[in-house]
Image (cartoon, rainbow, N blue to C red):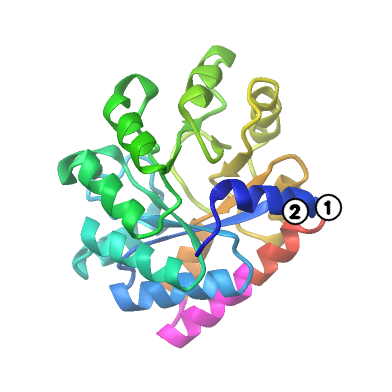
Amino acid sequence: MSRTLSEVFDDTRSHDRAALIGYLPAGFPDARRAVELITDMVAAGVDIVEVGLPYSDPLMDGPDIQAAVDQALTSGATPDVVLDTVAQVVAAGATALVMSYWNPIERYGTDRFADRMASAGGAGVITPDLTPEEAGAWISATDRTGLDRVFLVAPSSTDQRIETVAAVTSGFLYAASTMGVTGARTQVSSAAPGLVRRARALTDLPIAVGLGVSTGDQASEVAAYADGVIVGSAFVRRILQAPDHESARAGVRELAAELAEGVRRRP
């Protein structure tokens, strides 16, 4: 049985390090190979995996993730494929979340999705565009099924807004370190430490930083002040640039190992 988010963060805190959280869309480049790649990430040091639910109307996805999502949709990725992917990677020992915009979950059926996610052994769901004010049905469904629900705060969030978001969040609070779309960057936003500092004064939840981390050095930099380091576009880029599947697997393992070393090292 895979660990809960609380168990993962308790463990990483006991070892005085941040958790490494890796993202890949389900169905990218196809369902079978996505499971292999996600399993490789975990074997190489990723603590928590975000399984992306491909969606045709991205709100905050950068070009790499958009390209991956397009491939996933072309390969036939559906919510059922996403949930099957979660079940397979959990069976392999992963602690798995789904990362999804709200519209696909609502169309699938809020209670139905929560039930299927819980049955798959998933730990929770990240909903980047769902606000607490609109989350009544989702809060009820996740309370009933025991899933963690992860909401986002951004540098533009006021202290009052951070408190409001944290009050309905469980597992960890997702701190988006930059405004705008996702993508690996040459340097992580300078706004991230301030956002984490403000959030720490308002909640006891673990705080994970996402949007921009792509190297071990950047992971080390973020791990110095955050409880979790989230990496997505950098993994996707390794796969997109690989000449074949075995090269993609090797690239994912190499990057995961570099990042895992980074979250264990202080800059």
User: Which residue type carries mark 1?
Assistant: Arg
Tag 2 residue: 220
Q: Is residue 155 left or right of residue 262?
A: left
Counting other residues with Cα less than 10 Å from the Cα at mark 1, is it few (<14), some (14-19), or many (20 or more)?
Answer: some
Secondary structure state at the residue bearing disc 1:
loop
Most common SS among magenta residues: helix
Q: Which residues are magenta?
A: 242-256
Front position in the image: 17 or 250: 17
**For residue 98, above or below residue 173:** below
Reply above or below: 170 against 210.
Answer: above
The kind of residue on which mark 2 rests is Ser
**Depth check, front residue: 182 or 166:** 166
Q: Earlier in the sequence, mark 1 or mark 2?
A: 2
- The image position of residue 13, as x and y in percent, is 74, 48
Task: Give the residue displayed 56% in from the left and 39% down from the top.
Answer: 172
Residue at 53% across, 45% down = 211
Occupied quadrant, residue 63: bottom left
Residue 55 or residue 174, whichever sits in front: 174
Q: Is residue 153 magenta?
A: no
**Residue 235: x, y in percent?**
51, 65
The mark found on residue 266 in the picture is: 1
Instruction: Please report contact status of discs 1 and 2: CB closer than 8 Å, yes or no.
Output: yes
Q: Which mark is residue 119?
A: none
